[in-house]
Amino acid sequence: HDHDHDHDHDHDHDHDSPSYLTYTSGVPPMPISSKLRLIDPKREDIPSGIWPVFRLMDENGRIRTSKKDAYKFHVDTMTKEGFRHPREEEGDSSDNYRNINALRKDLIKQYPQHQSIFEYSDLFHPSSTSYTDINHDGEESKNTLLRCHRIMTRLREMDNILLNAQRQGRISFYLTCRGEEATYIGSASALEPEDVMLAQYREQGLLMWRGFTLEQFTNQCYGNDLDLGRGRQMPIHYGSRALNFHTISSPLGTQLPQAVGVAYKNKLDVLKMANSESNHQIIKPSVSIAYFGEGAASANDFHAACNFAATLKAPVIFFCRNNGYAISTSVKDQYAGDGVVSRGNGYGMASIRVDGNDVIAVHAATKAAREYALTYIEPVLIEAMTYRQGDHSTSDDSSQYRPLEEVAKVEEEADPIKRINLFLMNQGWMSEEEIEGIVSDERQAVLKALAMAEKRPPTKLDTMFEDVYQEMPLSLKRQEDELRKHLKKYPDKYS
């Protein structure tokens, strides 16, 4: 390992910082590093032994120094590449509530070795525009960190309530992301609106960050007349063209080569624009990002996508959320190698492993990956280590294949929402009472959206045959006629 020349200040909590990380029983512990380092096998040697996991915030909600790091890097990616520059300071409209600029400066003073991360992180800068879905005392807020906390809480409450709604028979299916909230909110907050997202099925948090409303979520799960998908998909198969989020499809891995195509097309459009003198259309360079579980990394599409992306030099981010289980199959039975991140080397792809329950670290890693992909016009692989606290879906009973003690231990010691709660409390930004109030408010908002969706009528039958062809062919018209005759013949069977 490289020698670390950081001169860390003494902190009382250093002795509480772990040196190794593991969330799933029986998995070899991974060395922790507080240095953000993307490893590109074409430009440097890959780590020896088990790949390190980047973490900035420990379970106690405190920023870690490098004293307890089990893996030491000499420099981080931001220093090494030199493409990261501090953002210009913007006005903070939240001076009377929580001053995010003051917090950033205070953290830099306490932890100078992490200065570049705090200066560049969007979480520690006010937004350029107000967030319409959070407010303080009736006023819209620009505080990105507080919105991050609020959306993570909202996501947890929506999952809890919609899961219960399925158990009550009110919706047919549901799938939670309990315990993985930091992976989605951390990464989504590091991307730009023009970056296209292609998800697997557990990533509702991405849409929530981009502004998908509780009403839109519940309308989709009910398949009512306001469902953007017109009732054609089973619950949780969300999509939004306006938010650059491709509609979820059930087969695993299909989104991976599609994401490469999206990135490659954008790359070609940017090159065409740059070489054209008459084209006045402005196309922003952007990335696509594909989310998938470690189980999907065993699918053929994963390998095809990685090879296409590397050889075509497509600016795509492959974001693997390693939550310990592919339905009932533990990672112990999925692979014999060092997780998923180590596979990037075989494709000549820059890669990083991050603690997926540390929202600050996930944000920083994703932001660095985006910058890297656009700087070199190459793909990047992120492996976020997290843990699926809930069942795979409402069709699953995880107590049949993993010990309840394992789940309880992670819930108690490594929950991502508890971690961000503790961070805000440590900074004097939140009290337990305030956090309980936010949870209550979000719960009521979800219940209200659920009740509204439940009262809506179903999608009209006509929509079943629309949108497939610009002009309906005779074969489809024949099917529609047959269906209507069938319904007319047996009206008592359909209501």
Image: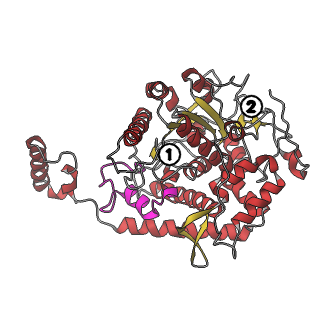
| Left or right: 223 as drawn, with respect to 388 | left
The residue located at (40%, 55%) in the rendering is 221
State yes or no: residue 257 in magenta.
no
Q: Main secondary structure of the magenta part?
A: loop
Spot the residue most to the front. 277
Query: Could you tell me which quadrant the C terminus lies in?
Result: bottom left
Q: Position of residue 494 (x, y in %)?
A: 21, 56
The residue located at (87%, 50%) in the rendering is 13
Q: What type is the residue that disc 1 sits on?
A: Arg
Spot the residue most to the bottom. 138
Q: Position of residue 246 (x, y in %)?
A: 39, 46
Q: Position of residue 340 (x, y in %)?
A: 59, 29
| Category of crowding for the residue at label 1, using alpha-carbon neighbours closer than 10 angstroms: few (below 14), some (14–19), many (at least 20) | many
Mark earlier in primary sequence (2, 1): 2
Quadrant hosting residue 401: top right
For the residue pair 447 and 193, the one nearer the viewer reads as 193
Q: Is residue 465 above or below residue 323?
A: below
Q: Position of residue 330 (x, y in %)?
A: 60, 31
Q: Residue 445, can we see it?
A: yes
| Left or right: 234 as drawn, with respect to 8 | left
Secondary structure type for disc 1: loop
The stretch of residues the image draws in magenta is: 208-237
The residues bearing labels 2 and 1 have C-alpha atoms spaced at a distance of: 25 Å
Residue 202 is marked as 1
Residue 29 is marked as 2
